[in-house]
Image: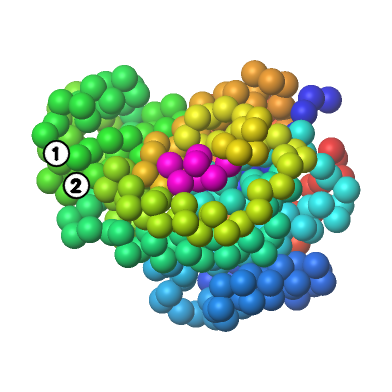
Amino acid sequence: MGKIAFMFPGQGAQYVGMGKDFYEQIPVCKEMFELAGKASGLDVEALCFEENEQINITEYTQIAMLAAEVAMLKAVEEKGIKPDVTAGLSLGEYGALAASGVMTPEDVFKIVRKRGIYMQEAVPEGGAMVAVLGLDTEVIEKICEEVDGTVSIANYNCPGQIVITGEEGAVQAAVAKLSEAGAKRCVTLKVSGPFHSQMLTGAGEKLAKELDEVEIHDIQIPYIANVTADYVSNKEDVKPLLQKQVSSSVRWQQTIERMIADGVDTFIEIGPGKTLSGFMRKINRDMTVINIEKVEDLDKLAAI
């Protein structure tokens, strides 16, 4: 058998009720939700488990998603499963940080609460994100460079799915050109801002000040950063990369390809939804992918 990777999804996969069965049935998971509440100053249980509109607002979504992910991570760890490498998409990178031992759960909760606030505050009027389906990456990159205004790639998700981000006008101008160039579909995302664009540089700068207050521990389990799609070998690089991540492209496809090249053949998606599992099918269908989002999913780990 090859290597095992843990992967954690990003914003957009959240739903009311995520992680509730873990909270109710596994003590260490309940502890993580309670710790998230204490670290953030929010009623995280209510945010995750009770019908509310806040769950889809960035400053609340991020801490809610992370609480569910870290709780599920602890349940997987209790099963004795240890990854050889870990990574997460955007917000999910903080789940990977918790799995790698780089930050304590309490510190990732504190930082992500601030990250959500700063990203929400930084959202300017007129930002947009659009998923571009069925067009070569090089064509999309070239068109983004040609368009006037701020538009760039936010996410390299998988073959045939790239997300662009930036100013509304520039994004729409790019969409027109992308459609002419043969894109199958261009889908406007229901997000509250142009995330992973240079328009959020200020949020990263504020986040850097919060990160200054956090202790970075030795990397116990290798993890791959969104910004570089490469391993972080020096713990001194962790904070600068997290600052940059807010306004830089998420190189998810490249991250997965790097893991596969290094011998990973089993990927465990930990968190709400099956977004990353879906991307994996388009990147490499030959990999074993296990999704953990319900307590009963833990039974799938017996095959590892």
Which of the pair 92/19 is nearer the observer?
Answer: 92
Marking on residue 167: 2
Quadrant in which the N terminus is drawn? top right
Q: Position of residue 98 (x, y in %)?
A: 68, 52
Which of the pair 124/275 is nearer the observer?
Answer: 124
Q: Position of residue 200 (x, y in %)?
A: 32, 50
Element carrying mark 1: loop
In the image: residue 263, left or right of residue 116: right
Q: Residues in magenta?
A: 238-244
- Residue 68 falls in image quadrant: bottom right
Residue at 39% over, 51% down:
205
Q: Position of residue 99 (x, y in %)?
A: 71, 48
Element carrying mark 2: strand
Q: Are marks 1 and 2 in contact (CB under 8 Å)?
A: yes
- The type of residue carrying mark 1 is Gly
Quadrant in which the C terminus is drawn? top right
Report crowding for label 2: few under 14, some 14 to 19, many 20 or more residues within 10 A (C-alpha). Answer: many
Name the residue tied to disc 1: 149
Magenta span includes 160: no
